[in-house]
Image: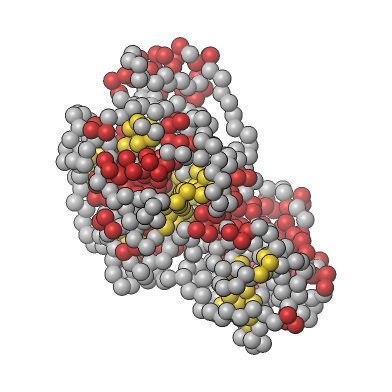
């Protein structure tokens, strides 16, 4: 069998649930809900398949705790000679599925900027555990593929713990099959796609959501693009606070999350309306390395969220016919099939990896390249993807539940992201550019109707709040800034909840009401739930600084307030302090009552245009409380 040949094992139930052709092409070990698979040569499939069957009843499956986000599984490492896939893809294989090199990827996805792609941008990669060889592995990968060095010495690479410090946790014991391989894949392929972008590796203490979610906060405070190649079932992790936090950063931070590799429903955070969910394709190339055609990868997870409502841009995709008002995933896709996967270097050995863990850093790298090449594009969010992204539609292939079709589908989403439009100039091919691929007739280049007229991708603005935000707060009975709905007086709390639940045919409350959980929640929890949906639905790239909230925190401001660039703090006489504060100078923070100093994103500055009172609020959890003492508010309010 050969000393380097891995032993592949699956359970009988898992095997019997797979389509026949998939079972015959078992390529990877299935462990939990992981996010990657690696390449396995077809010549050994008969031997591997026989061994798997013989050992079916001797395998013990370890299930992760419900609070665990498992990024380990769905691949087993196979050593890959780095000469097996060069920049011209001249490897001696008869199939059209070839390993993908950095040059091939940048060409097939029309990455702008060349070696300067991603200049001025920072991508944060969030993983669990440490990665002691991450920087040296990246150096070996860069040397092999002629990429510019990305090191801590030249300021390109940085590694921090989940709180932004230097207490990096121990390495995962899984080696290439665990978070170590995941880390190498993510870091190296962000650099492969955007060689000039800075990379920050954020290492959570474990794969528990209680550690990974704080790491996401840290990532968002340090970078404008965040790559998340992991996830868990929506019902498997406590996510309310995390989702509310992500909603505050909509239109400001570009989040990308892998949908998963089991070909079924994608998990969280990919199902969040606040991230770009990245699915997978199988890529077929010509002998010279150019793209021949692509199809939906059978492992690409996608489907309709059971928890989250789609935002307006996401609904514009036509997903409503598939998921109603629920969030549909994926949004876009990139190469994920292990057979057409990519080389990575980990701890002295070359491997070939696939999975949506590959597609996700490719997407994050492309975002860095696009924003680095066009100053008019400040964020890649749902509004950009559905209004301004040029895609190559993928209408072939399928996953476990769905088939790829013309237009939006639940295998590849909108398609493969290959270009962008804005009012000043296109980045990448325009919608009228014909495909030069030797593809089946069902594969076309498409974009939304608004893109064909060069829809403007407006930079984040803090000059004014949105109309929807002002209308929202102008009707609330108590226009005070609150840290927590549980601290609102009952009258204001109930009025705010009832008003919000009455809007847009009750869509912000109907999901939880229909689930039977409404009666189990108190008024503060009901308002928090409805608020998270409202904010996710209405925040735009115009900026909703005065509507910021996070966790279960809510910001309520008078409708006359607008964001401004003012730097002065409120006078002592014009505000109430409800807890001890720690003040720092400059624009990094105002009054803080927790240890979130290092993980909070930039502060939104709010000015009352009538009274001239300036108030600083965080765009994450509101940490300082102010009151304009409007009629109807009492000391008990805060």
- Residue at the outermost front position: 153
Residue 431: x and y in percent read 27, 61
Q: How is the image coloured?
A: secondary structure
Residue 47 appears in the figure: yes
- Residue at the outermost top position: 54
Work out which quarter of the rendered image holds the C terminus and state it: bottom right
Say which of 118 and 609 sits in front: 118
Left or right: residue 220 compared with residue 6? right
Residue 416: x and y in percent read 33, 50
> What residue appears at the point 35 percent right and 16 percent down from the top-left corner?
3
> What residue appears at the point 72 percent right and 74 percent down from the top-left corner?
626
Residue 325: x and y in percent read 54, 55
User: Splitting the image into 4 quarters, where does residue 70 fall?
Assistant: top right
> What residue appears at the point 27 percent right and 30 percent down from the top-left corner?
81
Work out which quarter of the rendered image holds the N terminus and state it: top left
Say which of 56 and 148 sits in front: 148
Residue 303: x and y in percent read 49, 44
Residue 295 appears in the figure: no
Left or right: residue 196 compared with residue 260? left
> What residue appears at the point 30 percent right and 25 percent down from the top-left corner?
41
Say which of 548 and 588 sits in front: 588
Above or below — where is 328 with respect to 550?
A: above
Count the marks.
0
Left or right: residue 512 compared with residue 431? right
């Amino acid at each position: 069998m050969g000393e380097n040949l891995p032993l592949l094992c699956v359970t009988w139930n898992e095997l019997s649930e797979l389509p026949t052709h998939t079972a015959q092409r078992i390529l990877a070990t299935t462990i939990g809900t992981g996010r990657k698979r690696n390449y396995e040569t077809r010549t050994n499939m008969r031997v591997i398949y026989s061994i798997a069957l013989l050992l079916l009843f001797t395998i013990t499956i370890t299930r992760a705790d419900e609070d665990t986000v498992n990024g380990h599984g769905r691949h087993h490492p196979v050593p890959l000679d780095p000469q097996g896939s060069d920049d011209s893809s001249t490897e001696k294989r008869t199939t059209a599925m070839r390993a993908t090199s950095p040059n091939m990827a940048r060409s097939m996805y029309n990455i702008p900027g060349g070696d300067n792609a991603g200049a001025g941008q920072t991508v944060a990669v969030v993983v669990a555990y440490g990665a002691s060889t991450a920087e040296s592995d990246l150096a070996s990968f860069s040397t092999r593929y002629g990429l510019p060095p990305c090191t801590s010495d030249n300021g390109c690479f940085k590694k921090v713990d989940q709180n932004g410090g230097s207490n990096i946790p121990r390495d995962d014991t899984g080696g290439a099959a665990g978070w170590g391989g995941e880390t190498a894949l993510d870091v190296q392929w962000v650099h492969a796609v955007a060689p000039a972008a800075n990379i920050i590796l954020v290492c959570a203490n474990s794969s528990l959501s209680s550690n990974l979610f704080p790491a996401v906060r840290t990532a968002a405070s340090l970078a404008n693009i965040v790559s998340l190649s992991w996830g868990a079932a929506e019902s498997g992790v406590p996510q309310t606070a995390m989702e509310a936090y992500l909603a505050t950063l909509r239109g400001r931070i570009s989040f990308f999350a892998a949908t998963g590799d089991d070909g079924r429903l994608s998990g969280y955070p990919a199902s969040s309306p606040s991230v770009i969910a990245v699915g997978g394709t199988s890529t077929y190339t010509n002998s010279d390395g150019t793209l021949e055609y692509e199809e939906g990868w059978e492992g690409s997870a996608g489907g309709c969220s059971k928890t989250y409502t789609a935002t307006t841009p996401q609904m514009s995709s036509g997903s409503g016919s598939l998921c109603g008002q629920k969030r549909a995933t994926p949004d876009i896709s990139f190469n994920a099939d292990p057979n057409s996967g990519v080389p990575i270097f980990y701890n002295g050995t070359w491997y070939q990896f696939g999975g949506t863990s590959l597609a996700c850093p490719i997407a994050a790298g492309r975002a860095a390249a696009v924003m680095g090449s066009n100053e008019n594009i400040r964020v890649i969010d749902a509004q950009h993807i559905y209004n301004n992204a040029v895609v190559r539609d993928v209408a072939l292939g399928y996953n476990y539940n769905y088939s790829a079709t013309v237009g939006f589908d639940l295998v590849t989403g909108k398609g493969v992201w290959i270009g962008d439009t804005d009012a000043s100039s296109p980045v990448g091919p325009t919608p009228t550019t014909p495909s030069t691929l030797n593809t089946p007739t069902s594969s076309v280049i498409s974009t939304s109707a608004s893109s064909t007229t060069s829809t403007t991708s407006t930079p984040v603005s803090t000059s004014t709040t949105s109309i929807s935000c002002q209308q929202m707060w102008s009707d609330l009975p108590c226009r005070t800034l609150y840290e927590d709905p549980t601290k609102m007086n009952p009258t204001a709390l109930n009025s705010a909840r009832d008003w919000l639940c009455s809007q847009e045919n009750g869509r912000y409350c109907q999901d939880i009401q229909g689930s039977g959980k409404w009666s189990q929640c108190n008024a503060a929890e009901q308002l928090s739930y409805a608020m998270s949906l409202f904010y996710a639905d209405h925040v735009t790239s115009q900026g909703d600084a005065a509507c910021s909230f996070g966790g279960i925190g809510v910001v309520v401001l008078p409708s006359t307030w607008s964001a401004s660039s003012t730097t002065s703090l409120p006078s002592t006489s014009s505000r109430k302090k409800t807890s001890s504060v720690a003040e720092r100078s400059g624009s990094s923070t105002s009054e803080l009552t927790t240890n979130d100093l290092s993980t909070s994103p930039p502060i939104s500055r709010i000015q009352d245009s009538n009274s001239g009172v300036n108030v600083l609020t965080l765009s994450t959890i509101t940490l300082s409380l102010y009151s304009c003492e409007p009629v109807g508010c009492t000391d008990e309010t805060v």
